[in-house]
Image: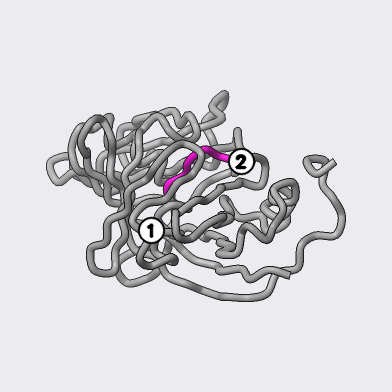
Amino acid sequence: MSRLHLLRVFCAEDGSGGNPLGVFLDGAAVLPERRQAVAADLGLSETVFVDDAGSGAIRIFTPAEELDFAGHPSVGTAWLLGDVQALRPPAGEVPVRRDGEDVYVTARPEWGPPHELIQVDSPADVEALDGAPAGHDFAAVWAWIDEDAGTLRARVFPVGIGIAEDEATGSAATKLCAHAGRPIEIRQGRGSLIRAQPAADGYVEIGGRSAIDDVRDYTLPERASAADR
């Protein structure tokens, strides 16, 4: 039995919205060969296993596979750990910054899934989608709300890693920010808010607000998945 923290990451300013995230702070207690089965059992877009809180060593899993980096798991885990200065997923070192209730992480746009940026004419066109555009397994569909103000509407469909639609996607935000070349504010999903700005040496800083919904005991699935065998 392990302790599971259930968060929402990239919440709106009033605490609503956000992308659900599962975090095991005692991740080292979950054997590496069991982690994919746990992530599949939970069914969240991502689940994080903290291997060492002091060094920020983490591993990130979708229901279908492990990721080298993902944004909302990094922001949420950094918020939960409290005083960590950097996270260390497989992709590399991810610096952490705090600004009041918000937490920011800095990463390279090429890390994480290969999101395809698909610009459409208006936020209404983004809203009208009923799923991923045909032929696209990692679609990040977006439109300016107010280009002068740097606000945009986005929906992300990473079906290639087992997620039909992601509520708030930090790795896609790094790519959108790099594409825009300036600070942006992203309204994604049903009510999530992501802030992003260019950083030094081609990196991008992303961040926002997190909230905890539950802390509970979790019993590992008894039946091994195909990935365990």
- Estimate the x, y position of residue 210 in percent, counting from the top left: 39, 65
Q: Secondary structure at mark 1?
A: strand
Q: Residue furthest front?
A: 54
Report the predominant secondary structure element of the magenta stretch: loop
Label at residue 66:
2
- Label 1 crowding class (10 Å Cα cut-off): few <14, some 14-19, many 20+? many
**Horizontal arrangement in the rendering, residue 148 relative to residue 93 (left or right):** left
* Circle 1 residue: 10
x 61%, y 59%: residue: 27
Q: Residue furthest top?
A: 135
Label at residue 134:
none
- Estimate the x, y position of residue 72 in percent, counting from the top left: 44, 52
Figure check: 132 above or below 206: above
Quarter of the image for residue 123 reads top left
- Image: magenta residue range: 67-71
Q: Is residue 69 magenta?
A: yes
x 21%, y 39%: residue: 199
Residue 191: in sight, yes or no?
Answer: no
x 27%, y 46%: residue: 196
Figure quadrant of the C terminus:
top right
Quarter of the image for residue 64 reads top right
Q: Secondary structure at mark 2?
A: strand
Q: Nearer the viewer, residue 114 or 157?
A: 114
Figure check: 135 above or below 191: above
**Horizontal arrangement in the rendering, residue 226 relative to residue 158 (left or right):** right
